[in-house]
Image (cartoon, coloured by chain):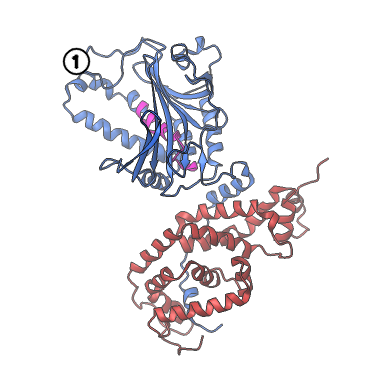
Amino acid sequence: MNTDEIEIFRAARPEVAPYEPGRRARARQLLLRDEDARRSRRWWLSAVPLGALAGAAGVAGVLGRRPDESGGIVPVSAVGYLEEAARTVEARPEVRPGPLQWRYTKERLVTERGRELVSEVWMRLDGAYAAQPGGRDGKIEVDEDPLGKDEPSPLRRYAELRVLAADPEQVLARAYRSVDGVRERWRRERDPVRERVRAQLLTEEHRRFLVFCEVAELFDAVFTPPRLHAAAFRAVAQIPGVEVRSGGRDPLGREVVSVGKLDQWGTRRAYLVAPGSYVYLGVSAVRERDDLMTLPALARGQEMPVVEQVAVGVGSYTLREAGGIVDRPGERG
Amino acid sequence: MPHPSPLTTHRSNPAHPPPDDATSIADSLTHPETFALVFDRHADEIHAYVSRRLGPDLADDIVSDTFLTAFRKRRTYDPTRPDARPWLYGIASRLIRDHHRSETRHNRLLARTPAPGPAEPFDDRSAARVTSQRLQPRLARVLARLSADDRDLLLLIAWADLTYEECAIALGIPVGTVRSRLHRVRAKIRRAFGGVDPTGVFEEGTA
């Protein structure tokens, strides 16, 4: 072939970096562990069948029991469990949603007093529309422009997550930076309620607790790429005081593993995952101890922004009943 | 006792040359891990190609998807073709099309990049390369304007070094169609450069 148009393009071939060995090894490993790879772009997270809805009064404290009262709830090695979780989720293929698909979530909030609220929402990934069941017949109603001014669309959030470094150390460092930014605002602000608890808000223990929450939010894998999801499990394992308990059930009767940390006031915040699949099932906040730091008394009418004082064994739950990416509002998988 | 994996056999017995792709793919029907040999042979090359087209960020995912797709479709592989490269490039090209918008953005970004000045000495050996570097933003503009079919063909030849026959396999079209389409692509490129030879050193019509 003479030097011609094709040669010009060939000579202009961009220089590229070689295949990074770690990523190459992961791709090869993924190829050999293809059991999870047959999912389509339209995917579903509700891997765990829903149990019968148990009465809230009877189950609200199940995860909140102390280990010695647990009746089957057992602490397990946090590091070992989280590493296994990381290996499992990082072997999953990343499924990239399209902008005109919808994110669907159905969540049930169970309050400390046993009240239940159900939220079922479809959000188009470009953020242009949201939908929810409305009226007596549950017909799906679609709203335009549901996002606030500075609120990112699901797709933008996904794009942001995709470019984050999927390395546990960097995930932790990022969480610490984020938490420290908030703490700096607390340090400066002159809110009279926070003034009363300022010293408690600024302890190192509370800082670690907030970092734990920040990282564990990534367990919700509707939009967390697998590599970042795995890094989140590994990062959480490095936070002192994180405890994993298996064998419990949530208020929906589902078997769950809870990855949690006690805050300095005695409330354990835990992220619930399905045993084996590590699918995110919700979050709980249950008071476990009343012998730790106490909160100063509040003036009448003041609302404590940090934690509500409730009896030991009582807590609240936000339970993910179903979630995934669907093609149109009203689809439930 | 189960049969030993062909992968194990070849690793443990270096006296035996590694099998060709067709053999590895056929073996992988009973020993799936054998497909790793196909990955080992071609992953770097496919990765470089995808990196050139979409940039490095997306290349990891596309390459991973390419081999997963190939693995799932391995039963349909034509066993008379010892070299799986055209097949793999075809799969990668289809996946790249899913990212067409990213690629177009990538090309438009390149198109906005100012052309570097003629800093290198211009001799016969480097003529095409230097000219190409100077013209790169224009080439990127041309690429962005080509249809997906034309772009796949042009880049499989220019960046993946596939022959016309291999392109035909990759794209699932007859060799004659490859030739005629390439002729059309050349004409489009010339038109995009205002009807003159883009190298500036060859007469129109020498291609």
Residue span colored magenta = A209-227
Indicate whether residue A51 is drawn in magenta. no
Q: In the rendered image of this protein, which colour is used for chain A? A: blue
Q: Quadrant of residue B93?
A: bottom right
Indicate whether residue A222 is drawn in magenta. yes
Please determine whether, in this image, residue B150 is positioned above or below residue A243.
below
Q: Residue at x 33, y 24 (%)?
A: A206
- Find residue A96 and report its horizontal and vertical position in percent: 47, 48
Inspect this view and state whether residue A18 appears.
no
Indicate the amino acid at tag 1. Answer: Gly
Residue under circle 1?
A301
Q: Quadrant of residue A202?
A: top left
Task: Tell me the SS state at disc 1.
Answer: loop
- Find residue A162 and report its horizontal and vertical position in percent: 42, 46
- Find residue B90 and report its horizontal and vertical position in percent: 58, 63
Q: Residue at x 74, y 58 (%)?
A: B23
Q: Quadrant of the N terminus of chain B?
A: top right
Q: In the rendered image of this protein, which colour is used for chain B? A: red
- Find residue B198 and report its horizontal and vertical position in percent: 42, 82
Please determine whether, in this image, residue B167 is positioned above or below residue A101.
below
Identify which residue, B79 or A127, lies in the foreground: A127
Query: Which residue is farthest right?
Result: B1
Question: Which of the chains bears the disc numbered 1?
Answer: A
